[in-house]
Amino acid sequence: LCCDIRICAEHATFGLPELYGFGDWLAGRIEAKSAVQATRVPQLQVMGAGVAPLNHISLLEPPAFKQRLACLSREYATIIIDGPAVNVAPESVLYAAQVDRIFLVVHAGITRAQVVATALDRLSAGGGEPVDLILNRRTFPIPPWIYRRL
């Protein structure tokens, strides 16, 4: 689910048309199946951002959003919510409190430790724990052939 209604690149990443999406489903304008699109990757389907309703934050409050996720989980074995940056938008804290597992993606060499600490504090205060960190775009300064010899 592309749950970052401000910026969503899932449709472009997978070469899909930008049709209905999460915002439309959240507003109740369409059923989830109408917003989900198949990708070229086997067993992977995505839901783009769509058009956000004006009251989208209130629609993410528990327990309403958790019930919507429960309905989705009857159709899909694994649901990944791609939310906005935790320190920028309140939605991510709302999502985090209602899911089974949280991953915080950190851009290696770019994201400062204080930014990560603030994000972790916000998630914890909102009831989203535990949090697993993913270090994204890590570079390997040592050539691969040296790693193979170790």
Image (spheres, rainbow, N blue to C red):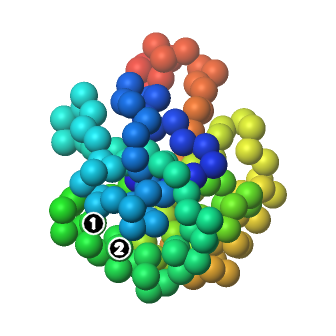
* Amino acid on which the number 1 mark rests in the picture: Leu
Q: Residues within 10 Å of mark 1 (few under 14, many from 20)?
A: some
* Amino acid on which the number 2 mark rests in the picture: Arg
Mark sitting on residue 68: 2
Mark sitting on residue 72: 1
As helix, strand or loop, the secondary structure at mark 2 comes to: helix
Residue 137 locus on image (x, y percent): 58, 32
Residue 65 or 86: which is nearer the viewer?
65
Residue 116 locus on image (x, y percent): 71, 57
Q: Residue at x 40, y 40 (%)?
A: 19
- Answer left or right for 70 relative to 136: left
Disc 1 versus disc 2: distance between alpha carbons? 6 Å
Outermost residue, bottom direction? 63
Q: Residue at x 52, y 51 (%)?
A: 51
As helix, strand or loop, the secondary structure at mark 1 comes to: helix
Q: Is residue 2 above or below residue 15?
A: below
Q: Is residue 129 visible?
A: no
Residue 17 sits in which quadrant?
Answer: top left
- Answer left or right for 61 relative to 45: right
Q: Residue at x 40, y 78 (%)?
A: 66
Residue 7 or 102: which is nearer the viewer?
7
